[in-house]
């Protein structure tokens, strides 16, 4: 199994995780604290800007995540850490989607 690298730009920490791991779980493994609410893609508390290499390094957003991101007016470069699951390659979490 190929592990996926998740880099958290703010604290400059990274972790290697198995495909299917959420970015929130990766943050926990990396020792990065993330503010959360519902943990099921509904509240948007954990919306973050991300950069994927390759572009499909994350699974596409599900209905809950997509609806929440649209409601928040966030584009394709933003994901909810509790919902976004890694697939392959490298994902960089660049920080709060509303601030970054
Ligand atoms: S914690 Fe609510 S959307 Fe992720």
Image (cartoon, rainbow, N blue to C red):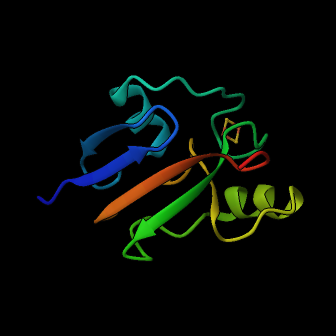
Q: Position of residue 48 (x, y in %)?
A: 64, 48
Q: Position of residue 84 (x, y in %)?
A: 52, 54
Q: Position of residue 44 (x, y in %)?
A: 76, 43
Q: Is residue 51 left or right of residue 1?
A: right
| Residue visible at 56% across and 44% down in the picture | 81
| Residue visible at 64% across and 41% down in the picture | 40
| Residue visible at 55% across and 58% down in the picture | 50
Seen from the viewer's position, the closer of residues 85 and 16 is 16
| Residue visible at 35% across and 29% down in the picture | 30
Q: Quadrant of the N terminus?
A: bottom left
Q: Is residue 37 above or below residue 51?
A: above
Q: Is residue 35 left or right of residue 70?
A: left
Seen from the viewer's position, the closer of residues 25 and 64 is 25
Seen from the viewer's position, the closer of residues 61 and 54 is 54
Residue 79: quarter of image: bottom right
Residue 95: quarter of image: top right
Residue farthest bottom in this picture: 55
Q: Quadrant of ligand 1?
A: top right
Seen from the viewer's position, the closer of residues 44 and 41 is 44
Q: Is residue 61 above or below residue 46?
A: below
Q: Is residue 98 above or below residue 63?
A: above
**Residue 48 visible in the displayed image:** yes
**Residue 21 visible in the displayed image:** no
């Amino acid at each position: 199994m190929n592990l996926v690298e998740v880099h958290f730009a703010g604290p400059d920490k990274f972790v290697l995780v198995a495909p299917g791991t959420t970015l929130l779980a990766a943050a926990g493994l990396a020792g990065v604290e993330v503010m959360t609410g519902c943990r099921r893609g509904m509240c948007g508390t954990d919306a973050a800007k991300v950069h994927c290499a390759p572009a499909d390094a994350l699974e596409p957003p599900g209905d809950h995540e997509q609806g929440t991101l649209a409601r928040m007016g966030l584009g394709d470069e933003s994901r909810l850490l509790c919902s976004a699951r890694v697939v392959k390659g490298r994902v960089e979490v660049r920080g709060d989607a509303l601030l970054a």
